[in-house]
Amino acid sequence: MALKGVARSVQPDLQGLEISPGELRHLTGVDPTEVFRPTILHNSKQRLHFLFQEVLLSLALMPIIVGLLHVFVILPFIGSSLIATLITLIVVPIVIVGVRWFWLKRNSSMTLCSLLDEVDRYNTVIKAIHINDQLEAAGTTEILSERHKVIEALTLVKEDLVRALRAEKILRENRNFLMSNPELLTTNLRTVQTLQVNDLASEYGRLLNEALQIATGVQEEMAKLQNKR
């Protein structure tokens, strides 16, 4: 399990629960960073990373496009013009960003966007459990006995997330296969709902509730996939 910034070992029951970027690429068939998700604009860190990537792409493409325009458009039809070159240098990056934005929105499935958001929430819960484990080991917080129920819920939620991501990929690539295999659209929501903790106000009660909300979100996206068949 690759949790960033974690120095101490991860508890055995947490290992393998996190859904890594590599696993996401395998499950979805796309690079998650190439999927435009409106929610990333609400997160300052993710927004900055997204904008930085777009700026780098624009800077990489600009010399090529400007050079081609200068050779095949400006020189043959306008001649050597400093003003035309400056206008081109200003307009081309704007056009690149606009086209890129349109392409990302057009090619980003809303269902996939929602599922990737749920994966982020899911991984956040896992990190919260690991932090709580560290606090318990240091003796700075009370040891809670219902941790196993949250782990059980997260295991079921991961199964649903993996199943949903695979189903979304299949729907994009082969709709008929999904129609003939409806079991791919089943979820563990009912099982997750049966898991309860004694103290809902505790940290594990909060995390279990978060896991339930994620499971509900995944079930809703699965229902949308079923309607698209």
Image: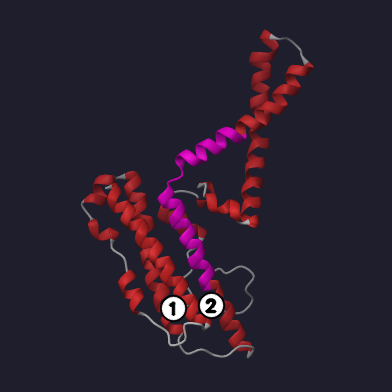
Q: Which of the 4 image quarters holds residue 172?
A: top left
> Which region is colored magenta?
97-126
Q: Which residue is mark 2?
A: 129
User: Is 58 inside the magenta-drawn segment?
Assistant: no
- CA–CA distance between discs 2 and 1? 9 Å
Q: Is residue 1 visible?
A: no
Q: Which residue is mark 1?
A: 151
Q: Is residue 41 left or right of residue 150?
A: right
Q: Which of the 4 image quarters holds residue 80?
A: top right
Residue under the point 37% across and 67% down:
159
Q: Above or below — where is 146 with respect to 226?
A: below
**What is the x, y in percent for residue 211?**
44, 71
Instruction: For the residues labelled 2 and 1, say whether their Cβ atoms are less than 8 Å apart.
Output: yes
Q: Is residue 168 left or right of residue 103?
A: left
The three-letter code of the residue at mark 1 reads Ile
Residue under the point 70% across and 12% down:
75
The three-letter code of the residue at mark 2 reads Ile
**Residue 206, label in figure:** none
